[in-house]
Amino acid sequence: MPSTDRLRAIQHARYYNGLDPLFLDTETTGLHGDAQIIEICLIDSTASVLYESLIRPTRSIPWDAVSVHNITDTLVSDAPSWPQVWSEVEEIIRGRYVGIYNAEFDQRMMRQTHALYDIPWEENLFSPFCIMRLYASFFGQSSGRYGTPRWQSLTDAARQCGITIQGAHRARQDTQLAMAVFNCMLQDA
């Protein structure tokens, strides 16, 4: 018999699925407080790419970030800036539910990148839901701290769901993986 947390995660996933969600992922210049977005992808529930773009940052991409996603300064040198990209992304996500693996991180990166360009952040523009948190409850491994579910990396979650991983750590591939992990929860009963 599945645990209560697992059943609740499945119910939440089914609820979000009924709202025809979009899925989003970003790649960034790092994890720190002044990191910014350098790639974004949005797909719909059929895995069709609605928007995908590299983004030219305001400063050089650190090597430790390049070693994760292989996005170099050369790759982004002719890319549009965040304000150009955001105007298009904003139209697509406005009023929608958007599934993001580690939504808190990607939202923080969006806010930080907005701040670099003095773009006001519209708090209720879209309704994000965190696939990582849902999956942690679904998978059910305890963190040992306060009995809360342990978060799984996207690649671990994909492997646990039996999903083949190709080209992880680029926005499109990670968006597709996040959607596949979400769909894995929908298939369980």
Image (cartoon, rainbow, N blue to C red):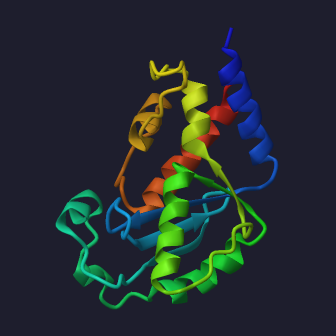
Quarter of the C terminus within the rendering:
top right
Query: Which quadrant of the structure image shows residue 174?
Result: bottom left
Quarter of the N terminus within the rendering:
top right
Against 141, residue 46 (above or below) is below
Query: Which residue appears farthest toward the top when viewing the image?
Result: 1
Q: Would residue 151 appear left or right of 19 to someone viewing this image? A: left
Nearer to me, 156 or 117: 117
Residue drawn at point x = 53 percent, y = 89 percent = 84
Nearer to me, 151 or 48: 151
Against 125, residue 31 (above or below) is above
Residue drawn at point x = 49 percent, y = 86 percent = 117
Q: Would residue 96 appear left or right of 156 to someone viewing this image? A: right
Residue drawn at point x = 46 percent, y = 64 percent = 26
Residue 189 shows in the view: no
Tell me residue 81's x, y (percent).
44, 88
Tell me residue 138's x, y (percent).
60, 27
Tell me residue 169's x, y (percent).
36, 56
Query: Which quadrant of the structure image shows residue 69?
Result: bottom left
Query: Which residue appears farthest toward the left when viewing the image?
Result: 63
Query: Which quadrant of the structure image shows residue 183?
Result: top right
Tell me residue 58's x, y (percent).
34, 85
Against 177, residue 31 (above or below) is below
Residue 70 shows in the view: yes
Residue drawn at point x = 34 percent, y = 61 percent = 32
Q: Would residue 132 appear left or right of 61 to someone viewing this image? A: right
